[in-house]
Amino acid sequence: MEKKDFERVQTYMRRLFNNAQIRVVGRPKKKDSAEVYIGDEFIGVLFEDKEDGDLSFNFQMAILDTDLED
């Protein structure tokens, strides 16, 4: 992923979720994905998908059962 793609997706996610603390950060050893944070908390991974000349991005977020407990 290129830096401009990080910025575009970050802007989209901030607007979509109405949260200016969302950050999309490149991964040191991976070129096809980035990490997504809210503030300092890691929330998921963003993957780039190039297929048949089309470009899309997939966001993957794990939710642990312990996170669901009150």
Image (cartoon, helix red, strand yellow):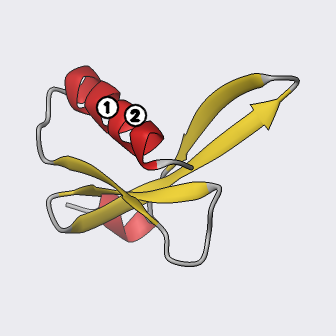
Q: Secondary structure at mark 2?
A: helix
Residue occupying the point 49% across, 69% down: 27
- Asked if residue 18 lies left or right of residue 16, the reply is left
Q: In the rendered image, which residue does mark 1 sit on? A: 13
Q: Is residue 62 visible?
A: no
Residue occupying the point 62% across, 69% down: 30
Q: Nearer the viewer, residue 32 or 65?
A: 32
Which residue of the protein is positioned furthest toward the right in this rendering? Answer: 52
Position of residue 35 relative to residue 17, above or below, is: below
Q: Nearer the viewer, mark 2 or mark 1?
A: 2
State the CA–CA distance, disc 2 to disc 1. Answer: 6 Å
**In which quadrant will I find the C terminus?**
bottom left
Residue occupying the point 58% across, 35% down: 57
- Within 10 Å of disc 2 (Cα), the crowding (few <14, some 14-19, many 20+) is some
x, y percent for residue 6: 41, 44
x, y percent for residue 59: 52, 42
Residue occupying the point 14% across, 35% down: 19
Position of residue 64 relative to residue 13, above or below, is: below
Q: Secondary structure at mark 1?
A: helix
- Asked if residue 66 lies left or right of residue 38, the reply is right
Q: In the rendered image, which residue does mark 2 sit on? A: 9
Q: Are marks 2 and 1 in contact (CB under 8 Å)?
A: yes
x, y percent for residue 39: 14, 59
